[in-house]
Amino acid sequence: MRAIEQQAVAAALRRPRYEVFPLDSVVDRVMEHLPADVTVTVTASPTKGIEPTLTVAERLAAQGRQVVPHLAARLIADEVHLKDVLQRLADHGMTDALVIAGDAKQPAGSFTGALDLLTAMAGLGHQLAQVGIAGYPERHPLIDDDVTIQAMWDKRHYATYIVSQICFDPETIAWWVGAVRERGTTLPIWIGLPGSVEYAKLLRISMKIGLGESARFLSHNRGWISRVLTRQFKPDRLVRELTPTATDPAARVAGFHLYTFNEVARTEQWRQETLARLGGGVASA
């Protein structure tokens, strides 16, 4: 990695986004282990509804943290509910949200996809300065690639950035970024990477959410994986091999979105060690 590329990667790792599940314990983990300038995104549970997301986000925001709640369309009942959700974000000073369809099998109301919710949000008016949408480097378990890429084009007027789903293949990620740009979508992209997570947890969650080729790789290599389940996955190779894409001005990569699966301390330790190795200094506490 050339010196200029090292500097660019270090700069991206100094301003990451950490994704967490909305469990009560994660608030203490974030407060104990993450510097105050790290943005935290809070997922939405298809089984528990959107309330845990909002509660955890509000608790973190009350502690002065930069918080991005996931607004899942299928968990919001109607425009009245949506207006209440947006007001809660405003009351707690949150100015960024990631709008997704959500994985609930049955929608709570009339919103079935992210575009439905984005359109309603625009109609109601909102205080959000940033609105993210999801992208899928690998095939979505329910939607074709061309459809997901076209969907980003359809949503571009309502959004300010894209967050990619977790992927273990740097070539697939690089191809997908190029495909998004060829379609004419110019929104900045946060590349989604797994954090420093136990292999056992990574295998279990990846198989559960169906990560295309990545899930198949994990499934077909169970024998090899069984020998390393007690080890920690670290995204060093992904970061290294994604450097040409992440540092290409035409790719418009905003940075790295780290899926921590609530392994906040281990992921942060990896980040600090990587920054030190890259000569980017150690992030402030």
Image: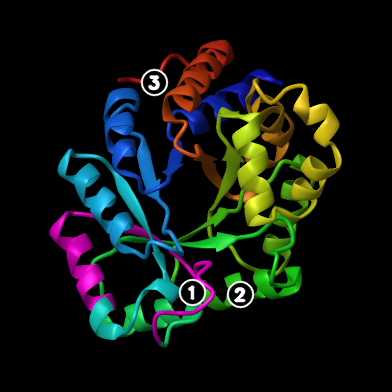
Relative vertical location of residue 164 with respect to residue 277 in this rendering, above or below: below
Residue placed most toward the observer, 157 or 39? 39
Q: Label 3's element?
A: loop
Q: Are marks 2 and 1 in contact (CB under 8 Å)?
A: yes
Residue type at tag 1: Ala
Q: Nearer the viewer, mark 2 or mark 1?
A: 1
**What kind of residue is marked 2?**
Ala
Name above or below for residue 189 compared with residue 63. Answer: below
Task: Inspect the image, locate mark 3, and give the three-letter code of the amino acid beneath it.
Answer: Ala
Query: Mark 2 or mark 3, which has the lower sequence index?
Result: 2
Q: Is residue 100 magenta?
A: yes
Say whether residue 51 is left or right of residue 240.
Answer: left
Image quarter of residue 219: top right
Q: Are marks 3 and 1 in contact (CB under 8 Å)?
A: no
> Magenta stretch?
82-109
Q: Position of residue 86 (x, y in %)?
A: 24, 69
**Residue name at image x 23 percent, y 67 percent:** 127
Residue wearing tag 3: 283
- Position of residue 179 relative to residue 18, above or below, is below
Q: Which mark is residue 151?
A: 2
Q: How far is the residue under mark 2 from the one under mark 1?
A: 9 Å
In the displayed orientation, state which residue is furthest to the bottom: 110
Q: CA distance from mark 2 to mark 3?
A: 36 Å
**Residue bearing mark 1:** 114
Sequence-wise, the earlier of marks 2 and 1 is: 1
Q: Position of residue 195 (x, y in %)?
A: 55, 33
Q: Is residue 19 left or right of residue 69?
A: right
Q: Residue at x 72, y 48 (%)?
A: 173
Kindly state the secondary structure of the residue where label 2 is placed.
Answer: helix
